[in-house]
Amino acid sequence: DTLTTAAYTDRLGATHTLPDPEAEARVRADDRGHVFHSWSAQALIDPLPVAAGEGSTFWDYQGNAFLDFSSQLVNLNLGHQHPDLVRAIQEQASRLATIQPAMANDVRGELARRIAEVAPGDLNKVFFTNGGADANENAVRMARAVTGKRKVLAMYRSYHGNTTTAITLTGDPRRWTNEPGDGSVAHFFGPYAYRSPFHSSSAEEEGQRALEHLEQVIVLEGASTIAAIIIESIVGTNGILVPPPGYLQGVRDLCDKYGIVFIADEVMVGFGRVGEWFAVDRFGVTPDLITFAKGVNSGYVPLGGVVISDRIAAHFDTVAFQGGLTYSGHPLACAAGVATFEVFERDGILERVRDLGSRVVEPRLKEMLERHPSVGEIRGAGLFWAIELVRSKETREPLVPFNASGADAAPMGALAAACKKAGVWPFTHFNRLHVAPPLVISEEELRRGLDVIDRALDVADEYT
Ligand code: PLP
């Protein structure tokens, strides 16, 4: 397959040419006329009409190429139009496009088995959902059924999805307009050494104090009322916060001590983002439930799920699990998931993520930290990094205020625009720019994209 800005042939053999202003006008008119977009004031947005994608690049209808440094919504782990995934979906569609969840199906079973094989400890069963929010929703439901308790503790600075319980668990402003939502949720502070809520002076101390705080919250909220603690193994949208060594193990120990189910939300970090199947593998910790979505099949067909420990699964041996979705374990989605496993294993994706992260991204971001007055901190792992931007390295005042919008957010808008103008599509959130390209990105593309970000940071420097 070829894709240039002049012409390309798609996976079914049809030829398209770019630029294509007529198609662009049609797409824009239909979109602006009739598509109601997520999280947006509808009249204030101008969604980019996208014509095509291949690997780490996508094209608009003008023929402009963008290196996808946000992997769409950090889901496109194997890049656009991966031939193995496209073929698997096409073959499955021609064989059996859909089958309801109460029946057994080959790809659904194979994917569940392969997930269980790479999941830690005794997490051996998989409940499939349509995405991440409903995975968390069902994990919480399982924890409540098993413990007979209702309350769930979740972190400030977290995102767990946009259904009722998932958005209540969320510890960022997206929760506010949806409150009260699920009535049985309380929040706690997780470790964030750069802006420590505990005034600690090292990562180790931060982890320790965060655990002491969590235990206080458990005691004051009442261990006898708490069904589960849910944590993003590495906080994603809210800052790429890698927990200090010992923190997740400490959470595991507190859960054991107080009879609480430990749910690890791996929707964003699972399936290779940090060079492991699951981010908990970095810490050698086994939660009771792991939720996943996104990278399981790069979002080619919506899919998520809950990986369940034997102990929790056994509770439902003779008691029905009260939950289900028409499209649970959809064959097209599962076929893309099985193909994902094959690509990961054949192409050594986990190894290449670890290699590119430590050899290319980390040193390059360290240079940016040295060089740019606006870069306060860089942190991350694998192909998942945050550049935290500040007005002053000394005071650590954020480049834009927490929850900034409109004119307040202008410096980040200018930074994102500078990246896009130079052909990199970045992920920005409040005062951070995240580096999260597809895991199949070539070293040359990765270096080129990082060069673009480095130059674009000059724009942020002007606000320091
Ligand atoms: N959990 C985490 C950590 C996420 O990053 C997201 C989405 O970004 C979700 C849950 C929600 O997933 P979905 O949008 O598929 O419902």
Image (cartoon, rainbow, N blue to C red):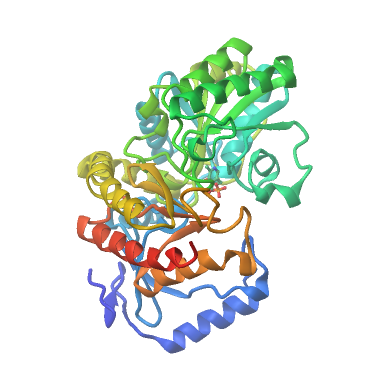
Quarter residue 410 falls in: bottom right
- Residue 258 shows in this picture: yes
Q: Is residue 402 above or below residue 62?
A: above
Q: Residue at x 50, y 51 (%)?
A: 302
Image check: 219 left or right of 312?
Answer: right
Q: Residue at x 74, y 17 (%)?
A: 222
Image check: 294 left or right of 41?
Answer: left
**Which residue is the extreme one toward the top?**
257
Q: Is residue 246 above or below residue 128?
A: above
**Which residue is the extreme one toward the bottom?**
22
Q: Position of residue 428 (x, y in %)?
A: 49, 58
Q: Residue at x 38, y 30 (%)?
A: 113
Q: Position of residue 53 (x, y in %)?
A: 35, 67
Is 295 or 73 nearer to us in this picture? 73
Is 294 or 94 nearer to us in this picture? 294
Q: Position of residue 288 (x, y in %)?
A: 52, 22
Image check: 126 left or right of 382?
Answer: right
Q: Is residue 14 above or below residue 401?
A: below
Q: Residue at x 42, y 39 (%)?
A: 270
Is 444 or 3 nearer to us in this picture? 444
- Residue 329 shows in this picture: no
Q: Is residue 28 above or below residue 361?
A: below
Rendered-image quadrant of the N terminus: bottom left
Q: Position of residue 14 (x, y in %)?
A: 31, 76
